[in-house]
Image (tube, rainbow, N blue to C red):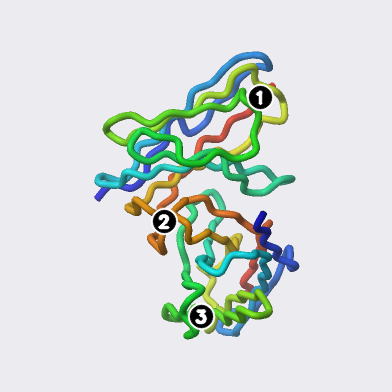
Amino acid sequence: AQTVTQSQPEMSVQEAETVTLSCTYDTSESDYYLFWYKQPPSRQMILVIRQEAYKQQNATENRFSVNFQKAAKSFSLKISDSQLGDAAMYFCAYRSGGGSEKLVFGKGTKLTVNP
Amino acid sequence: KAGVTQTPRYLIKTRGQQVTLSCSPISGHRSVSWYQQTPGQGLQFLFEYFSETQRNKGNFPGRFSGRQFSNSRSEMNVSTLELGDSALYLCASSLAPRGGSYEQYFGPGTRLTVT
């Protein structure tokens, strides 16, 4: 079974600074997808960024980028120029490429942004 | 386009009762997944439906069941409620018929409290 581990329960960053959230995963599959989701307090979970395992190039979405190290099974999220609105729980998630929509989530990292 | 809606948003039930939660996916989405979110266990996959068929089921007891209707709306039912069933139940919908990197859109969740 696949597992996802987020080793940082809480992180904090100063506004306008950069922060990196860590995620490692375990799988024997070669076809899979990785995601970072954001869950603001009392608000809906939204997708931040996704990475297809077959793509070597790291995904980027504006201020958000990932460092995907397939051999190390590592998938970290970098947030640049942090904003107060970035404060949220961040979840790393894994999905098999076999056709199921099932997401396997990490425990999450609570990000605080200090003004 | 309206997002994923879940009803009711809040629910208080007594041990031993049963409960039905509803999820309406985004128009055109045929895949619906359910997740249970608790502080202790995090986000755990319950089940996944596509075109009225259950495609995948998580490791939950038989008290948890679900179904999907022809209009893609989905319901989940929990019978003989236990205190440990208190959680935020999240529904997510997706365009994907066969997985892939399609985004899953989450609803606001139903907060179930069992007393």
Q: Residue beneath label 1, please?
A: B114
Q: Secondary structure at mark 2?
A: loop
Q: Position of residue A35 (x, y in %)?
A: 52, 65
Can you see residue B18? yes
The residue that appears at 54% across and 49% down in the rendered structure is: A42
Distance between the alpha carbons at the discs numbered 1 and 2: 34 Å
Q: Quadrant of the C terminus of chain B?
A: top right
Q: Residue A90: which quarter of the image?
A: bottom right
Distance between the alpha carbons at the discs numbered 3 and 2: 23 Å
Dot placed on the residue nearer the N-terminal end, 1 or 2: 2
Does B57 sit left or right of B14 as displayed? left
The residue that appears at 66% across and 60% down in the rendered structure is: A108
Q: Secondary structure at mark 1?
A: strand
Rendered view: B84 above or below B96:
above
Q: Residue A65 has which mark? A: 3
Q: Badge 3: few (under 14), some or many (20 or more) residues near its Cα, within 10 Å? A: some
Distance between the alpha carbons at the discs numbered 1 and 3: 40 Å
Q: Which of the two residues, B114 or A24, is positioned nearer the viewer here?
A: A24
Q: Residue B27: which quarter of the image?
A: top left
What is the chain letter for disc 1?
B
What is the chain letter for disc 2?
B
Kindly report which numbered mark, 1 or 2, lies closer to the viewer in this rendering: 2
Q: Which residue in the rendered view is the most extreme toward the top?
A: B16
Can you see residue A115? no
Does B57 sit left or right of B103 as displayed? right
Q: Which of the two residues, A15 or B31, is positioned nearer the viewer here?
A: B31
Q: Residue beneath label 2, please?
A: B99
Amino acid bearing label 2: Gly
